[in-house]
Amino acid sequence: MSEPLLVEIIAYAPTAFYHCTHCEVAFREMGKSNRVHEEQLESSLPEDLAQDYQAISDWVKEMFRVHCDQLIIKVIDAASIEGVYKSLRYNARRYPAVIVDRQSRFTSRDSLKSAADEINRLLAQPEITTEPA
């Protein structure tokens, strides 16, 4: 496979609101702490959704460890406009929803494992056998 495989994950994600980039740089240089942003991220998801998000993060790290640059993984917040659009497009009603190669959709409780199996299948290199001369 020459092009990387696109994997989209629709899930509830922690959210923090920031000022424009210029203001954030100015605030940081003035010594203002990021305490507000840290608090927003810590309290933006209930405990069960935070655990789900941590499992997604661990899964993404493992997928990159195994497949390196053969994947493009995009995590989409289910509560965002893009998340609503993708949920409707792929008929995803449970999260996390994993869309592999814009075709295969996994939304069951084992969606990460099922998606990993599909990714492994799609990226499997055919074994080259050489016959003795």
Image (cartoon, rainbow, N blue to C red):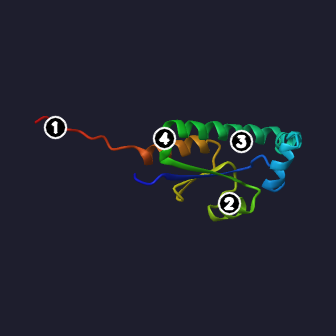
Residue 32 occupies quadrant: top right
Mark 1 and mark 4 lie on one chain; the one further toward the N terminus is 4
Mark 3 and mark 2 lie on one chain; the one further toward the N terminus is 3
Q: Which residue is mark 4?
A: 67
- Disc 1 crowd, CA 10 A, few/some/many (<14, 14-19, 20+): few
Q: Residue at x 74, y 49 (%)?
A: 12
Real-space Cα separation, disc 1 to disc 4, in angstroms: 29 Å
Foreground disc of the pair 2, 1 = 1
Determine whether the residue tagged by mark 2 lies in a helix, strand or loop. Answer: helix
Mark 3 and mark 4 lie on one chain; the one further toward the N terminus is 3
Residue type at the position of mark 3: Tyr
Foreground disc of the pair 1, 4 = 4
Residue type at the position of mark 1: Glu
Mark 2 and mark 1 lie on one chain; the one further toward the N terminus is 2
Could you say which disc has been placed on residue 53 in the image? 3
- Disc 4 crowd, CA 10 A, few/some/many (<14, 14-19, 20+): some
Residue 117 x %, y %? 50, 42
Real-space Cα separation, disc 3 to disc 4, in angstroms: 21 Å
Residue 7 x %, y %? 56, 51
Foreground disc of the pair 2, 4 = 4
Mark 1 and mark 3 lie on one chain; the one further toward the N terminus is 3
Could you say which disc has been placed on residue 56 in the image? none
Could you say which disc has been placed on residue 87 in the image? 2
Look at the image and tell me whether residue 119 can be seen: yes
Residue type at the position of mark 4: His
Q: On the rendered image, what quadrant is the C terminus found in?
A: top left
Residue 5 x %, y %? 49, 52
Real-space Cα separation, disc 3 to disc 2, in angstroms: 17 Å
Residue 131 x %, y %? 16, 37
Q: Residue at x 51, y 48 (%)?
A: 71
Q: Which residue is mark 1?
A: 131
